[in-house]
Amino acid sequence: MAGARSVPRLLPLLALSLPALWGLPADHSIVQTEFYQKSLGAAPDAEEFMFDFDGDEIFHVKDEETFWRLPEFQQFASFEAQGALQNIAIDKQNLESSMRAYNRSRVPSEPPEVAVFPKQPVEQDEPNILICSVTKFWPPALELRWLRNGAPVTRGVLETPFYPDRDFTFRKFSYLPFVPAPGDYYDCQVEHEGLAKPAKMHWEPQILVPPSEATETAICALGLAVGIVGIAAGTVLIIRGMKLGRARAERGVL
């Protein structure tokens, strides 16, 4: 793929809120999202079918298989991937009809917002996960890649499907396992047709270097010295207070 910016795309989008059908209270919703995306360039066409509950994914269908966000969800529900494939086929037909009817007109693109942050507080040599959050973009077509010290890295990388938002934009997340080390830096690079050039979000781990043995010894010595001074000062104050107490008692007798 030459980059999402150079590949015009058209797509239909179906997003249905189904609280009544699933017996949910009005303040909760299950949303079905599906689309078929046709490339007008050399890139392959794309498609997606997914369900989410209050913005969190339940499952999505890919390569004729249902993928549950958490395996435990399969204990309470089931879904045949064939049903999703039939819906996608209908979407494809509708898209072809729309393209002929509207002369391939398109909705303006919305560029993404990109942020990078670690899952856990960063500690040297402790395994962690770096998260790249890409939000508020349209259409749901982009290229995302990780760079470590300027070089591409793909090992262990996981990506979510495109998640719909209520304003009809999308969000997507990518996860990179890493072990923090001094001097390392990371970039999350995103290409999208709404961007004039690829967006690159830079991130460097702020690692607290453990104190050396000499530093620890100096700190302990300083703490001991402060403690001794405190004890001495306290002893002096106690003695002075006792003397003042005796002096007042003697004046009272006279």
Image: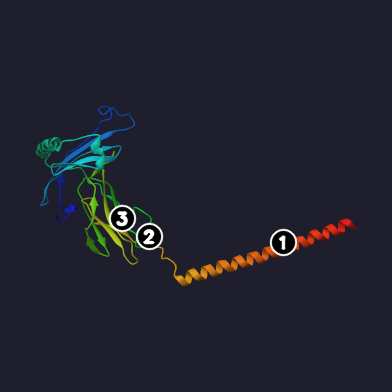
Report which residue position mark 3 lands on: 130
Q: Is residue 203 left or right of residue 231?
A: left
Q: Is residue 77 above or below residue 40?
A: above
Element marked by disc 3: strand
Provide the residue designation for mark 1.
238
Q: Picture quarter containing residue 18?
A: top left
Residue 216 % position (x, y)? 48, 68
Q: Residue at x 23, y 52 (%)?
A: 158
Q: Secondary structure at mark 1?
A: helix
Q: Earlier in the sequence, mark 2 or mark 1?
A: 2
Of pointers 2 and 3, the one earlier in the residue sequence? 2
Image quadrant where one finds the N terminus: bottom left
- The quarter of the picture where residue 78 lies is top left
Residue 218 position (above or below residue 118): below
- In the rendered view, tell whether residue 180 sits above or below residue 43: below
Distance Cα–Cα, label 1 vs label 3? 57 Å
Q: Position of residue 67 (x, y in %)?
A: 20, 42
Circle on res. 123: 2
Q: Write the residue at 67% across / 65% down.
A: 233
Q: Where residue 37 appears, x then y in whole percent?
A: 15, 43
Circle 1 or circle 3, nearest the eye: 1
Amino acid at dot 1: Ile
Tell me which amino acid carries mark 2. Glu
